[in-house]
Image (tube, rainbow, N blue to C red):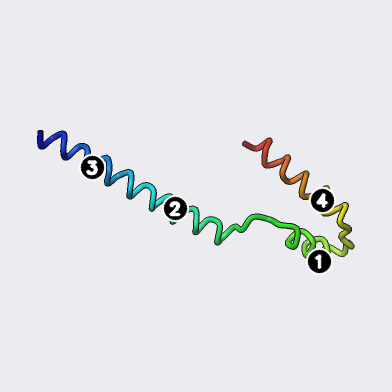
Amino acid sequence: MPFALGLILGVLLGAIAGFFGARAYMKKYFRDNPPVNEEMMRSMMMSMGQKPSEKKLNQMMQQMKQAQKRAK
């Protein structure tokens, strides 16, 4: 009986610790590597000397979304 109780308690504590560890890791990851949005794309294009139009921005965002889907 004490073995089963210890096993159940260990699994529960491991699941809780794993959840909070993964949550902290993902928060740090997104803080260090924020997802790219249209404003970031616009500023990148302007820094490269291109005048970003809405059509070009939409095309680039669609290409990035498709590339992310293919990578998965």
Q: Which residue is mark 1?
A: 47
Q: Quadrant of the C terminus?
A: top right
Tell me which label, 3 or 1, sits earlier in the chain. Answer: 3
Q: Quadrant of the N terminus?
A: top left
Residue type, mark 3 in image: Gly
Residue count near mark 4 (Cα–Cα under 10 Å), binned few <14, some 14–19, many ≥20: few
Tell me: 22 left or right of 66.
Answer: left
Residue count near mark 3 (Cα–Cα under 10 Å), binned few <14, some 14–19, many ≥20: few
Q: Which residue is mark 4?
A: 58
Q: Which residue is mark 2?
A: 23
Q: Which-is-in-front pick, marks 3 and 1?
A: 3
Q: CA distance from mark 1 to mark 4?
A: 18 Å
Tell me: 10 left or right of 16.
Answer: left
Q: Is residue 15 above or below residue 53?
A: above
Element type at mark 3: helix
Residue count near mark 2 (Cα–Cα under 10 Å), binned few <14, some 14–19, many ≥20: few
Tell me: 5 left or right of 28.
Answer: left
Q: Which residue is mark 3?
A: 10
Tell me which label, 2 or 4, sits earlier in the chain. Answer: 2
